[in-house]
Image: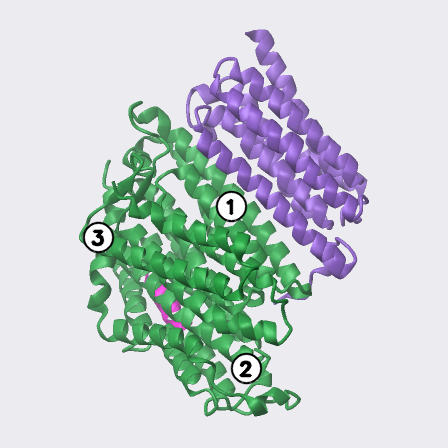
Chain colours: A purple, B green
Amino acid sequence: MEESVKLISTLSLSLIITSYFVIELRNLRYSAYAYILQALLMCTLFVIFARQNPGLYYWALTAFVTKVVIIPYLLLRYIRRTTDHEFRPFIGYLGSIVLISIIVLVLYRVTHQYIEFLAPTPSAMKEPFRTNLAVSLTIFIMGLYCILSRRDAIKTVHGLLVLENGVHLSLISLTPLLRETAIIGIVTDVVVAAYLLLYIIFGVFKEFGSTDTFQLKGLRW
Amino acid sequence: MNSEILYLFVIPALAGTAIFFFGNRAPLFREGIAVLGSAITFLLSLHIAVCTIHGEVLSLFQEELRVDALSGLVAGLVAFIGLIAVIYSVPYMRKEVEKGVILPGRLRSYYGWTMLFLSSMLWATTTNNIIMLWVLIEGTTLASVILVAFYWNRNALEAGYKYAMLLTVGITFALFGCILLYSGASPHIPSALDPLKITEIAKISGKIPKSVLLLSLALLLAGFGTKSGIIPFHTWLPDAHAEAPTPISALLSGVMIKVGVYALIRTVTVFYPVYPESIKLFVVVLGVLTMLVGIFMALMQDDLKRLLAYHSVSQMGYILVGLGLGTYMGIYGGLFHLLNHTLFKALLFLCVGAISSVAGTRLIHSLGGLGSKMPMTALCFFVGALAMGGIPLFNGFMSKLTIFLACAKAEMMWATVLAIITSLLTLFCLLHAGYRVFMGKAEDVTNQANENIKEVSPLMWGGMVVLALLCFVIGVYPQMVFPILDESARAISAMTAHP
């Protein structure tokens, strides 16, 4: 059991590292590969938890189909049709690494320490759910940071996907018995949202000649 | 078996799918199917609303779908404005094709997405499952993204990107809130019952840990608040409402943001039995700030659609204040204003659509003297303006008065005073804009289109007249909507009456 807890904790923490790569890699294609790796790690985590709760096998399969296959296919397709170089963000590489590291360290420590404010049940306060919840909230905020700090529209979609992964990860600890219809609903929304966003960004690229969101200023005030 | 609940959202979904598959064969087919589908949906919603007025609760699939008076009210409004918007779309979009703004083939996409948009909103009002509620609220965003960016020009694409990104991020907060609420409730709900059902969660809300409850409340307010256009999450609203085709603006402003409020009511009212005073104060302050920011931004606009969009932000503030008070009178006033705002805001957007359709612009400084050329549109616009300004004999007066009184009764006189000031500024802003457009003289004489302007077709002003009449009739005889509003307010109280 202790072995399993250690493995889960290691996998959970490696999700934070893959989020770093998704956010900080300036090549959008490599960033998408990092996202695939993160999705695979998430699926592995679901499978490990599923040994105790078989309902999670379904969640693992759904996550694999959507996060490892469909979404990366869409991402790579639109990156190929636009550009694979991220438009220069307004926070430099070093500054961004320092800033995000501070956010991660503080957030992870605080949420792990004071999990009783976040965990609704006594079981969610125990390991490995405790680490899982702290990691999911950290990834959620990392995704939000990516959306807020990046100028490149495709990169903001990467941020959105990381943010969504954070919420989906929390489902292990918070709602392990979620019904299939709800799971399908949640992941379908993510896939459709990613597709529509990329479709519009492609339109923006054709119209503006760039995926720089700073050019989208025509409608201020 | 109350299968009419199922038909309510399946019929527009089928109509939308049929348009996507066969809509290119004959232009009349896509328009005919859209009008027919929305008309049948409206009749169904009317039947459901009538059933729920008498306190009946319709349900299907072991209460997975559940319609009480509140759902009946919102579904009825969605279907009603949906029908008017679809009928209005026929001449409006044909003219857009004539002007070369869009290609004829794109009308299939327009009507197809519109019907799916209606279906998603109607489904959202009938579900009793907290996760499905989130899924469907996000579904309403996804079904309308292409409609917001429909013109596919620079402004439309910018609006579409902001709309999809901001609402998807915002709504993800709500997913976290829904999950926490479900997770906190499930240990206290007997295994025979379903902890995903909102009605079950509401019964045991007092047993959920306080810290989790507060966190859920914050996340739900941020998530569904974004959808409802509440500050500081309102920035998508003026762009999307202004850049979408006008019938869609009427749907977005008239009903979609109300569906966001509906989700807020369904989830946040779960907290009413354990409602600390500080949260009540926070929600009322948020509502008042929304009112003020909305009206000050509206006063600065030259674009009629952006002006109306900022008014929507402001009016959502009134609804939030009423609901946030948590008293019967507050909830009643909030729901009454929700109904009224649906009517007069859809009316005003349709009027602006008529103006821009014939004048080719919606900038106030380029318009003038349209009153004599477009008398029906002018009359309808002023009815809408007076209604939103809260003038007696029009529907906005009674709902605003109810909210003022509810605030005063809750000993929040400061909120009453600020709400009255906002109302006066609203009246000034709209009458000033109306005067310039219909009675004033255009500053920008380069707009040659002003010369050939004439009233729009009856298919367009017909819907406007119906809405204007309703604004007046409800204003003169507000008792006519009392039964459904009273039953809706009671439905909220009943859901949360358990300790």
Tag 1 residue: B171
Q: Residue sitting at 64 percent across and 73 percent down? A: B100
Q: Is there CB contact under 8 Å for labels 1 and 2?
A: no
| Tag in front: 1 or 3 | 3
Label 2, secondary structure: give it.
helix
Q: Residue sitting at 56 percent across and 63 percent down? A: B107
Q: Is there CB contact under 8 Å for labels 1 and 3?
A: no
Q: Share a chain, discs 2 and 3?
A: yes
Residue closest to the eye, A189 or B276: A189
Q: Share a chain, discs 1 and 2?
A: yes
Q: Which residues are magenta?
A: B412-423
Residue B313 position, x and y percent, is: 47, 63
Mark 1 or mark 2: which comes first in sequence? 1
Q: CA distance from mark 1 to mark 2?
A: 37 Å
Residue A158 position, x and y percent, is: 68, 40
Residue B95 position, x and y percent, is: 56, 75
Q: Main secondary structure of the magenta part?
A: helix
Tell me, yes or no, if residue A97 can be seen here: no
Looking at the image, residue B456 sits to the left or right of residue B412; the answer is right
